[in-house]
Image (cartoon, rainbow, N blue to C red):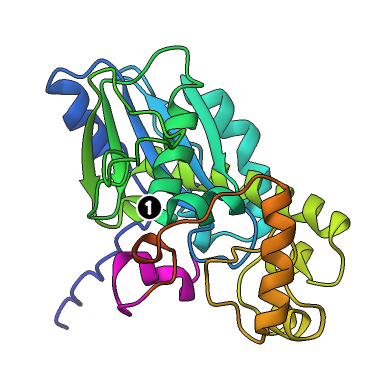
Amino acid sequence: MAERPTARRPRSTAPTLRRERELLRSGHALVAGVDEVGRGALAGPVTVGVVVVELSTRSAPVGLRDSKLLSPAAREALVPALRRWAPGWAVGHASAAEVDALGILRALRLAGTRALHQLPALPAAALLDGDYDWLNRPHPPPAASCAPLGGGVDVVTQVKGDLRCAAVAAASVLAKVERDALMVGLDAEHPGYGWAGNKGYSAPDHLAALRELGPCVQHRRSWRLPGTTAAGQAALAEQLDLLGALDAPPEDRAGAEPRGSDEALGARGA
């Protein structure tokens, strides 16, 4: 009888430290994985997680995946292990008002810079999920409180970094868990929008509440919020002006035309 060919084992979907170790061996003493959460939400902050590794860092805790592939319970269970595993970690936020004032890319930069500057020491390199370096570009307007990254940090982009790179996946988990907790708290302050469940994204219950209640101060008013009237937007603008929020120029607003531009990604979840 002919011998049956040995079945190939499926490739592991677990992220590894391979890319991070390449950067570490090239002369970078510390490398940070960086990922964002909340970019496509209609309400709440945009959040950036940072996880630092070094050459002596062991393989990531069992079960680590990109946060989008994990259940809420699995993400929360991983957090203590990730915090023990990583030599350094931090999470930074930029509020809905800051998204409106700066545009989504500059708000991402602000949140990421805040996270990096919470670390005891800046990493030599930052491994950023995606193919665009929003940690350094676009440059902030002169009046914005969006500090430059500085410190000689080399930013390296990695497509599907949250799937392939353990430090980036860990950053996505920490950012997701912290932002989700913030949205649960904001749901208690602004009931009716279902944020404890939808976390500020464009879920049917959130859209229905926007049509019924209109937006609140935690909504990104520069985005074209579904179902809101001009009167509702004007009332919200008055509330935000009282809070000292700034208007972004039309060409820099999140959700602005042309469709498909990087600033127009608010229609997509993250």
What residue sits 54% from the left and 57% below the top? 38
Specify whether 160 is left or right of 88: left
- Bin the neighbour count of mark 1 within 10 Å (Cα to Cα): few under 14, some 14-19, many 20 and up: many
Q: What percent of the width, then of the height, locates residue 229?
A: 68, 85
Q: Is residue 217 visible?
A: no
Type of amino acid at the residue the image marks with label 1: Leu
x, y percentage for residue 213?
81, 78
* Residue 62: in magenta span: no
Q: Is residue 124 left or right of residue 1?
A: right
Residue at position x 59%, y 68% in the image: 42
Q: What residue lies at 61% left-to-right and 49% top-to-bottom?
A: 245
Q: Which residue is tagged 1? A: 105
Task: Pick whichever, 96 or 115, lies toward us.
Answer: 96
- x and y percent of residue 238 in the render? 71, 61
Q: Position of residue 258 (x, y in %)?
A: 30, 78
Q: From this view, report whether residue 112 is shown above or below residue 172.
A: above
Q: Write down the quadrant of residue 137 in the picture.
A: top left
